[in-house]
Image (spheres, rainbow, N blue to C red):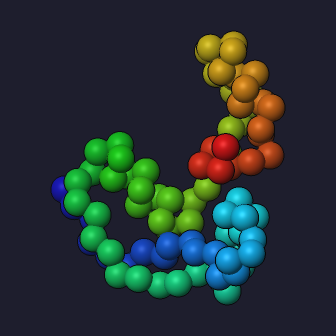
Amino acid sequence: MSFIGRLTKNVEISDQLDDCEHDPTNMNDYIHKDVIIIGNGPSALSLSAFLSGYYPYYDPSIPHPNAVLHEKLLAARDKSIIDQ
C-alpha cells in the first residue's frame, strides 16, 4: 500500500541556526510540499511520520531491555530520537 497525500516537511528557514534548534510547533519553520511515499515498510512509515512533524522521544518509564542502550537513551532524553 502506498501513501499519497499532502505532508509537511520541517525546514529551518535561517541558515544561521543549527538543524537541532528548530521549533516543530512554529508554523513559520514549515514549507508545504506535495510528496509521494512509495511503500509501507518501516522506512516509509518512519519517513511519513517524520515529514508529518512527529518527533519521537524516549520514554524512560518503559526501560529498554538492553541496559547499555537504556543508559545511552537516558543521557539524551531531552532530545528527539531523530536529533540524537
In the image, taking residue 55 as reference, residue 36 lies left or right, namely: left
Q: Is residue 51 visible?
A: yes
Residue at image x 47%, y 58%?
49
Residue at image x 70%, y 80%?
14
Q: Quadrant of residue 69?
A: top right
In the image, taking residue 12 as reference, residue 47 lies left or right, namely: left
Residue at image x 27%, y 51%?
40
Q: Quadrant of residue 6?
A: bottom left
* Residue 81 image point, x, y percent: 63, 44
* Residue 3 image point, x, y percent: 27, 65
Residues 61 and 54: in front is 54
Q: Is residue 56 visible?
A: no
In the image, taking residue 41 as reference, residue 19 lies left or right, namely: right
Could you tell me which quadrant the C terminus lies in? top right
Determine whether 64 is above or below 3 in the image. above
Q: How many numbered dots are placed on residues in this image?
A: 0
Determine whether 55 is above or below 53 in the image. above
